[in-house]
Amino acid sequence: MHALLEALAAPGTCVHIDELPDLLGKSYRDACNDLRRAYAAGLIERASEGCYRLTERGRSEDAEPLMLVAAPCSTGGVWDATARNRIWAAMRQLGKFCRADLAAAVAQPDSDRRALENSIRRYVARLVAVGYLVPLTGRVRVAAHPNPGQKRYRLVRDTGPASPLVRRDGSIFDRNLARVVTADVQAG
């Protein structure tokens, strides 16, 4: 993994994914796994389709330990394999949103809409509880729902590209900060 960071170390360097196996001396699969870990830890970013470069965090001295601590062991072979990753990315992009906005942004043709909406509801509730999101005043009417409207939220703790993980005990593991965040100890 250190070789990946060295390959991208020159300022402004953008390496295409097809060049990685030769640069790293690894198989395509192993090179992509290193790339996934670095991406999940927020050490690299996608500059254009198939082309990656280091972030400021990736240039720091303690970058490689973050890949081991913060990145998941497996991403399931797809960059945004989980709905939670797509939801987090949509939150970061939208800034202010209601749950229907998130559902519209992350729904896929083959996804179960009700399960997705339930996942969004639970994820938003946990992120509000630990201070990542704050509810805004007022509600927005949503055509698909006959209720008086949905709450709007604002993302106030954007810690990076990797989605915070909800743990069984209700706390959040922030992969960008590489630490557990609870309602008592909010991200800061």
Image (cartoon, grey):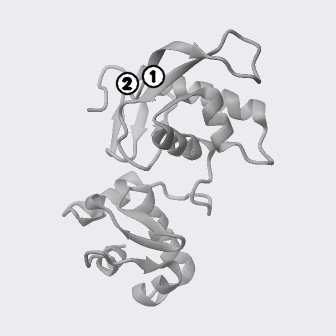
Instruction: Look at 75% across and 22% down and name the residue there.
Output: 143
SS for tag 1? helix
> Which residue carries the number 2 mark?
131
Instruction: Look at 54% across and 71% down and name the residue there.
Output: 49
In the image, residue 25 above or below residue 81: below
- Label 2 with label 1: CB-CB less than 8 Å: yes
Q: Amino acid at mark 2?
A: Gly
SS for tag 2? loop
Image coordinates of residue 38 in percent, x first then y, are 40, 63
Q: Is residue 100 left or right of residue 165?
A: right
Image coordinates of residue 127 in percent, x first then y, are 46, 27
Q: Amino acid at mark 1?
A: Val
Instruction: Look at 44% across and 49% down and name the residue there.
Output: 162
> Which residue carries the number 1 mark?
128
Q: Nearer the viewer, residue 140 or 63?
A: 140
Image coordinates of residue 68 in percent, x first then y, are 36, 59
In the image, residue 22 above or below residue 122: below
